[in-house]
Structures are given as structure tokens and as C-alpha cells.
Image (cartoon, rainbow, N blue to C red):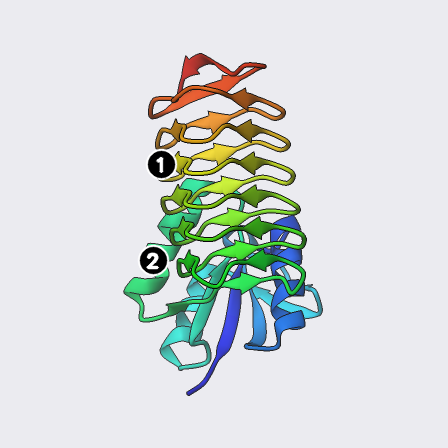
């Protein structure tokens, strides 16, 4: 079966994802998709062509792509593009850097990206399209819903629950057993010591809710 992969995105996170894909050697990387590329002259990224969504759809119809990896930082956009791709028959690829540590019993969802130096410990459940970024850690028995971004250097202690499309900012820490609500944003360097509701921005030490999103 063909394992021809396109990466959706053509900027910083896509650069990281492409490097992981090439290091792993499990897919043939054929190009990148960028909605902002429409009407532009031919563009290349990481040595491969960048196409807009219309041209990408034609590639799907011609059977030139079998898998897609959504490499965009925006959590809601990542989920929307994942749905769009699945509706057109594509499979979601995951990318785990060779230097990342993922316990054998971790449940890792489709489309997940686990970057260099990240650690996901035993019993964790990671949903679809989750990013566990550079040197972040997700400790044992955490449950992360789909579309979450755990930013570089963020640390989740044991049994933390994170709701769909939440954002855990760079260098943030979450103590064990805490729940982060769906769509919430934890600011950089925050220390979360109590549950956060859905759809809020929280930061500080200890973190407090600043506003609803």
C-alpha cells in the first residue's frame, strides 16, 4: 500500500514535522499544503512543492497522496483540517521523533506529533492531532483529548486531564490530578494548581483565570 505523505502547513512547525518524518523513514514525503499559497508563483519548502487546497484535492483524486500530517500550531485549525482530510479518504499520519520517549502502553492518537526530547509516560492516553512539543513531558495516566498543544518545556504531572483543543504554554507546569478545560489557554510559565474551566485564559504563579475566550 502506498504511504505517500503530504504535510499541511509550510512554516515553523511543518519544518519540525518534516524533519521527524524524514528521520523515521516510514513515509515518502511528497509535498506541503498551504491555503495562503493560492495565486502565488510556484513555491518550494524543505525542497518540495507547496500547493493550495484546490490543487491538493486534485492530487487526492489522482491517488498521489495517501496520508496527511497536519502541522499547524492553531489547535482548532488542526482539527478542522483533519476532518476535511478524513472526509476525502486520507489517513492521518503521526510523527514521533527518535529521541522522544513514549512508554510502550501509551495510546497515541492519529495525527499526533511528538517532538525531540519529549516524554510521555506509562498509561497516558493521547488524542488525535495532539502536539507534545520539544522537551515537554506528559506523566503517567494523563488523558489528553484531541487537538491539544503542549508547548516546549511544559510539564504535566500524573493524572492530569486536558480538554479538546486546549493550549498549554511554553514552560508551564500543571500539578497532578488537575483538569484543564476544553479550549482553554495556559500562559507561558504558569503553574496550574487547581482545575480550570472550559474556554478561559489563565496565567501566573499560581495560575488564575484572566478572562473567558
SS of the residue at dot 2? helix
Q: Is residue 42 left or right of residue 123?
A: right
**Residue 82 appears at what percent x and percent y?**
38, 56
Q: Residue at x 48, y 80 (%)?
A: 3
As drawn, the residue found furthest toward the right would be 47
Number of on-image labels: 2
User: On the image, numbered disc 2 is attached to which residue?
Assistant: 84
**Residue 202 appears at what percent x and percent y?**
48, 18
Q: Quadrant of the N terminus?
A: bottom left
Nearer to us in this view, 117 or 32: 117
Nearer to us in this view, 157 or 99: 157
Counting other residues with Cα less than 10 Å from the Cα at mark 2, is it few (<14), some (14-19), or many (20 or more)? few
Q: Is residue 43 visible?
A: no
Q: Residue at x 40, y 31 (%)?
A: 177
Nearest to N terminus: mark 2 or mark 1: 2
- Disc marking residue 212: none
Q: Residue at x 57, y 36 (%)?
A: 155
Q: Residue at x 58, y 50 (%)?
A: 119
Counting other residues with Cα less than 10 Å from the Cα at mark 1, is it few (<14), some (14-19), or many (20 or more)? many
SS of the residue at dot 1? loop
As drawn, the residue found furthest toward the bottom would be 1
Q: Is residue 60 above or below residue 154?
A: below
Q: Is residue 193 visible?
A: yes
User: On the image, numbered disc 1 is attached to which residue?
Assistant: 163
Of discs 2 and 1, which sits in the foreground? 1
Could you say which quadrant of the image residue 66 lies in?
bottom left
Q: Is residue 57 left or right of residue 88?
A: right
**Residue 91 appears at what percent x and percent y?**
38, 69
Amino acid at each position: 500500500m502506498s504511504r505517500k505523505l503530504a504535510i499541511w502547513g509550510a512554516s515553523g512547525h511543518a519544518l519540525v514535522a518534516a524533519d521527524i518524518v524524514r528521520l523515521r523513514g516510514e513515509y515518502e514525503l511528497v509535498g506541503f499544503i498551504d491555503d495562503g499559497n493560492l495565486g502565488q508563483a510556484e513555491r518550494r519548502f524543505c525542497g518540495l512543492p507547496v500547493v493550495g487546497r484546490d490543487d491538493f484535492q486534485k492530487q487526492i483524486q489522482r491517488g498521489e497522496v495517501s496520508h496527511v500530517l497536519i502541522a499547524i500550531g492553531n489547535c482548532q485549525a488542526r482539527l478542522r483540517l483533519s476532518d476535511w482530510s478524513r472526509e476525502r479518504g486520507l489517513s492521518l499520519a503521526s510523527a514521533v521523533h527518535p529521541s522522544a520517549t513514549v512508554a510502550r502502553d501509551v495510546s497515541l492518537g492519529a495525527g499526533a506529533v511528538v517532538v525531540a526530547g519529549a516524554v510521555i509516560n506509562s498509561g497516558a492516553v493521547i488524542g488525535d492531532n495532539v502536539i507534545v512539543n520539544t522537551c515537554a513531558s506528559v506523566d503517567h495516566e494523563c488523558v489528553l483529548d484531541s487537538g491539544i498543544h503542549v508547548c516546549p518545556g511544559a510539564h504535566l504531572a500524573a493524572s492530569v486531564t486536558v480538554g479538546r483543543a486546549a493550549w498549554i504554554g511554553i514552560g508551564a507546569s500543571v500539578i497532578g490530578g488537575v483538569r484543564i478545560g476544553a479550549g482553554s489557554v495556559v500562559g507561558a510559565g504558569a503553574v496550574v494548581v487547581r482545575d480550570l474551566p472550559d474556554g478561559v485564559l489563565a496565567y501566573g504563579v499560581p495560575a488564575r483565570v484572566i478572562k473567558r475566550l
